Amino acid sequence: MNEQASFNMQVLDALLLDYATGALSLPLEVLVETHLAMNEDSAKTMNMLMKLGGVLLEDSDPVSLSEGALENVLKAIEDDEENPALDTRRIDTSDGFLPRPIADYIPDAGHSSWKRVGIGLFECDVVFEGDKGRAKFYRIAPGTAVPSHTHTGTEVTLVLEGGFTDETGSYGPSDIAVQEEGCEHKPVADNDGECLVFTINQGDIRLTGPIGRVLNLLVN
Amino acid sequence: MDIKNENFDFELVTDDPVSLTRDMGTGCDNDNAKGMSRWDIMLVRVGRDRDQAAFAALFDYFAPRIKSFLLRLGTDMSLCEEIAQEAMIMVWRRAETYNPAQSGASTWIFTIARNKRIDRLRRENRPLPDLSDPAFAPETAETGEKAIFRQQEEEKIRHALKNLPDEQAKMIFSAYYEEKSHREIADESGVPLGTVKSRIRLALNRLRAHLDEPEGIWKP
């Protein structure tokens, strides 16, 4: 395994652990949850991490609840017995559709929130409540090269459809690519179809190529 | 009684009109049902029979552990109490969806408490995933075998955790008990981010290796 692949595996495990413990920001949580719906190996790891949580919960030293806590709870469950509200949903992994967590956020291709930001390149802002990072969808036409750019913060990208290749490797559906702060990269979409990605950036993007420097003037 | 009947007989379940409503494999009237812990059985009773005594037993065991777990995360005392109670109310409401073949009671309750806590700390009220979702349960073995298999897995996780090198175990405990993201662990411990990630990767690999021991041991 090359250095980059091993780096990617480390980042993935760290993100999975953060997800299991509930430590992720909302955009990253949505990203990881979508990845889990698409990737069986990670779903298995998540199963293991939730079991680990159960083991650690059982091994915790108990701290007594206040007087009458059980009575409170029993009263509450009697009150709502007729109309139990479930706080869960299924993750739809059926073919041809994006899984639920991300499908809730992505607009149709023709929607006005998609903005053309280059030849064969469309972006769409995703707004999360209380979110400090920047979350975007990108649609990249087959074979299109995204202008070379660098980051002032870490960028996490999940491939939803199609694939792309950059200096760090090739990525396909369900793959997560991480660009560390200061890294420069120039992703090129695969030739066999449009590439759809979900990207979260915890800093600003600076375009670095010759065209990029001109575009920077527009960004800033 | 032949060997098969020493486990709870799932074929009988299909003759039981109550259990027919859900494919839970919960025809476990025998408290020594193989592969199920005492708490798994209690939780099945809550879901199937709406058994308040079983619920009270679960409450007495798990509520003080949830509270303790949350206190370690630095959550405010009265909020811990509230979340612990709300989590147990959710245990009652959702017990019907509990599948002992997929997770132990402690794992299932851990995920409920985790979701409840995220829910309370976040403004955006997003429905959280369900562990019984097929996307999180890629295994395909028969229900009875799965219950035994997954309980052995929990024991193996406990064992593997005890045998982790200190610096790796520290990452796991910081993540679960202090709810630190891997980035926060690095920031606060002074251990470089790359080292944190590689330790998490090594720890998860050790845990995964314990679960992937030679096939044929648990399979019939």
Image: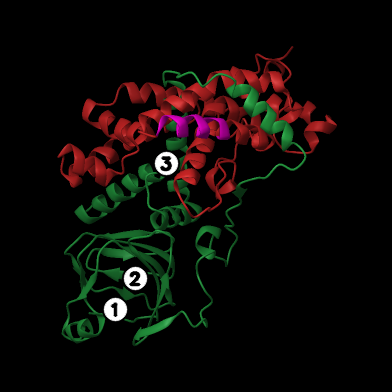
Chain colours: A green, B red
Amino acid at the residue labelled 2: Phe
Picture coordinates of residue A13, whole percent (x, y): 33, 45
User: Magenta span covers which residues?
Assistant: B76-86
Left or right: A198, with A68 as reference point: left
Picture coordinates of residue A141, whole percent (x, y): 40, 81
Identify the secondary structure beneath mark 3. Answer: helix
Q: Chain of mark 1?
A: A
Nearer the observer, B143 or B197: B197
Mark yes or no: residue B85 visible. Answer: yes
Task: Name the residue beneath numbered marker 3.
Answer: A20
**Of the two numbered discs 3 and 2 in the rendering, the one whose residue sits closer to the viewer:** 3
Picture coordinates of residue B32, whole percent (x, y): 65, 14
Picture coordinates of residue B151, whole percent (x, y): 53, 25
Which residue is painted at 28% across and 29% down in the image?
A: B169
Task: Name the residue beneath numbered marker 2.
Answer: A164
Q: Is residue B173 above or below residue A115?
A: above
Identify the secondary structure beneath mark 1. Answer: loop
Left or right: A184, with B208 as reference point: left
**Of the two numbered discs 1 and 2 in the rendering, the one whose residue sits closer to the viewer:** 1
Whether residue A9 is in magenta: the answer is: no
Which residue is painted at 36% across and 42% down in the image?
A: A17
Mark yes or no: residue B25 visible. Answer: no
Alpha carbons under labels 3 and 2: distance apart: 28 Å
Q: Chain of mark 2?
A: A
In contact (CB < 8 Å): disc 1 and disc 2: yes
Alpha carbons under labels 3 and 1: distance apart: 33 Å
